[in-house]
Image (cartoon, grey):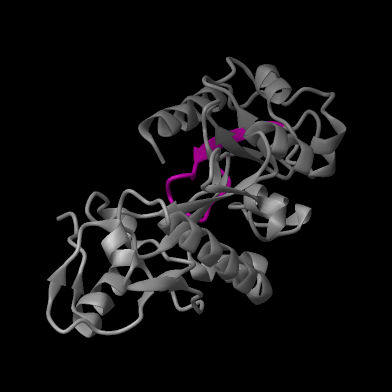
Amino acid sequence: MSKASDAFENEIVNMVNFHRGETLPSVLPRWLINEGVRPGARILYAEGIGSKDKNNKTDVVVYLEDSEPIKISAKLMNADYFGNWYGHKRFLAEFGEAAFYRMTVASTAFANSWARTATAPYVGVSICFGRRTGRTGQDFTDIFTTEDILTVARGYGNGISTANCMYISDSSARDIPGLIRNIEAITVASVNQATENFKVAHRPINPMTEGTNRGKNVYTRFQPYRRLSSRTIITDPQELFRLGEFVTVEPTSLNHNHILDDLEANYNIIVPRKR
């Protein structure tokens, strides 16, 4: 999470904890009651959990007496992603194997197309879900179902990590009634509105400028046609892409560093990495 996102989360937590012991309004939106939240429930406390686990879709939990908690997915107004850097294990758990193979086919098609005009080298493509413009964005429903949008926004399962509402703003409400007015149900319509049409964001990673992102799982990989006769350092993308093409991958948690290691050890191709 960014510092701004952390600050927004903390604002909400601090506001709710300032009002602990108070009660929720006696009239709540029907969708919130359907989530098991009891009108008039006493507020016990709030906790920020968004940064505790990368798989948490809930950022702030408001614990209530004799009621299901309010589990808030907190987003800044300019937030781009609902699902950031999906790894293979998480992908399989949420969407299944068939969707994985549709995803790797789509990423491979993107990578081979992007390679024709690329101005930076890359050996794999990672994915995120949310707002994306330009050629790196692909309609989510090209690959997934509309119901899968809810899985990305809410999370998978029914535990604390799975959000039951979202709060999109740049600052926290000042009191509990204001919080209730500003949170909203997570629906296909509300998520699409928040993201200006839900997209798969293809993320080609330039090893020469990217550090930690090289550890993200890939959904396609660069595969050379043959081994070079001697060790060759390549920084020009078009020189690199003449040597092979992108191919689909299996769900083995392959990342960019793995591919770079393979290219160097087995194909004598060295793409420099940011240290």
Position in image of residue 44 (x %, y %):
61, 35
Q: Residue at x 61, y 52 (%)?
A: 160
Determine the main secondary structure of the stretch shown in magenta: loop
Q: Above or below — where is 15 with respect to 51?
A: above
Q: Residue at x 27, y 51 (%)?
A: 210
Position in image of residue 246 (x %, y %):
44, 70
Pick the front one: 213 or 244: 244
Is residue 12 rendered to the left or right of residue 244?
right
Snapshot quadrant of residue 261: bottom left
Is residue 99 rendered to the left or right of residue 249?
right
Pick the front one: 196 or 171: 196
Q: Residue at x 30, y 51 (%)?
A: 120
Q: Quadrant of the N terminus?
A: top left
Position in image of residue 203 (x %, y %):
44, 52
Q: Above or below — where is 230 with respect to 63?
A: below
In this rendering, does residue 142 appear at all?
A: yes
Is residue 85 rendered to the left or right of residue 61?
left
Give, as a single range, the part of the protein colored magenta. Answer: 42-60
Q: Residue at x 65, y 59 (%)?
A: 156
Position in image of residue 241 (x %, y %):
34, 65
The reply to whether the magenta stretch includes residue 55 is yes
Q: Quadrant of the C terminus?
A: bottom left
Snapshot quadrant of residue 144: bottom right
Pick the front one: 137 or 246: 246
In this rendering, does residue 222 appear at all?
A: no
Count of marks, rendered view: 0
Looking at this rendering, what residue extends furthest in the right direction? Answer: 30
Is residue 257 rendered to the left or right of residue 246?
left
Pick the front one: 274 or 91: 274
The reply to whether the magenta stretch includes residue 75 is no
